[in-house]
């Protein structure tokens, strides 16, 4: 059986977790949402070293996996190197913002399955600024550009929801 190890990266609100879940079901493999590793209950951040160890253990314990999230402190290079495919969700700000707001109203007062228990859905000024500006600053854009260039042979860039739908239809 061919190994399937898919790393999904991209902008906040682009649908990384949703795509990860669908691909995990399709390939019958374990899915790791890095938001579940990074966030502890009450939106407390986990120590980077501990996060790195947990992700490394997950990768080493599974031949086939889907991991969604960016988090450079979570075995980033290992994930990119070991991935058989990297999917970059390069959606426009307006789509990501719309999806984040929609997600907030869908899960308000609840915890999504792609985040740690005890982290009720929230939409605050800091997160909105991250989606609109900070998460797309020059450093982040250059980082994504470099990843796409370095791993061009296994990179898939999807720029909108229609591209994701087409990708899933042809997988």
Image (tube, rainbow, N blue to C red):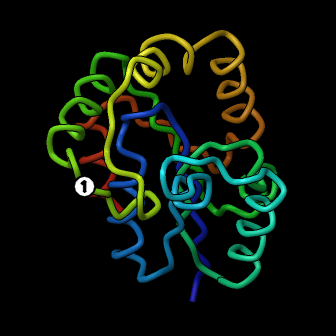
Q: Is residue 143 above or below residue 16?
A: above
**Residue at point 44% right, 25% down?**
127
Q: Nearer the viewer, residue 157 or 123?
A: 123
The part of the image, by quadrant, that contains residue 25 is bottom left
**Residue at point 32% right, 65% down?**
22
Q: Farthest residue in the front direction?
A: 42
The part of the image, by quadrant, that contains residue 18 is bottom left
| Residue 89 x %, y % | 45, 37
Q: Disc 1 on helix, strand or loop?
A: loop
Q: Nearer the viewer, residue 72 or 7?
A: 72
Q: Nearer the viewer, residue 71 or 87?
A: 71
Residue 52 as seen in the image, left or right of residue 7: right
| Residue 1 x %, y % | 57, 90
Q: Which residue is mark 1?
A: 110
| Residue 135 x %, y % | 55, 21
Quarter of the picture containing the C terminus is bottom left
Question: How many discs appear?
Answer: 1
Q: Is residue 35 above or below residue 108?
A: below
| Residue 33 x %, y % | 51, 60
**Residue at point 67% right, 44% down?**
71
Q: Farthest residue in the right direction?
A: 49
**Residue at point 56% right, 57% down?**
40
Q: Residues within 10 Å of mark 1 (few under 14, many from 20)?
A: some
The part of the image, by quadrant, that contains residue 155 is top right
């Amino acid at each position: 059986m061919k190994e399937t190890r898919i790393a999904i990266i991209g902008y906040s609100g682009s649908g990384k977790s949703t795509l990860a879940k669908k691909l995990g079901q399709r390939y019958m493999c374990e899915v790791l949402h890095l938001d579940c590793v990074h966030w502890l209950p009450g939106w407390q951040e986990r120590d980077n070293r501990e996060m790195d160890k947990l992700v490394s253990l997950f990768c080493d314990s599974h031949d086939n996996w889907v991991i969604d999230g960016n988090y450079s402190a979570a075995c980033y290079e290992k994930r990119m190197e070991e991935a058989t495919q990297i999917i970059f969700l390069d959606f426009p700000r307006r789509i990501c913002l719309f999806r984040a707001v929609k997600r907030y109203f869908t899960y308000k007062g609840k915890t999504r399955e792609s985040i740690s228990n005890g982290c009720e859905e929230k939409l605050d000024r800091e997160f909105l600024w991250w989606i609109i500006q900070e998460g797309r600053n020059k450093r982040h854009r250059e980082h994504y550009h470099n990843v796409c260039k370095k791993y061009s042979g296994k990179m898939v860039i999807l720029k909108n929801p229609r591209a994701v739908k087409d990708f899933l239809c042809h997988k």
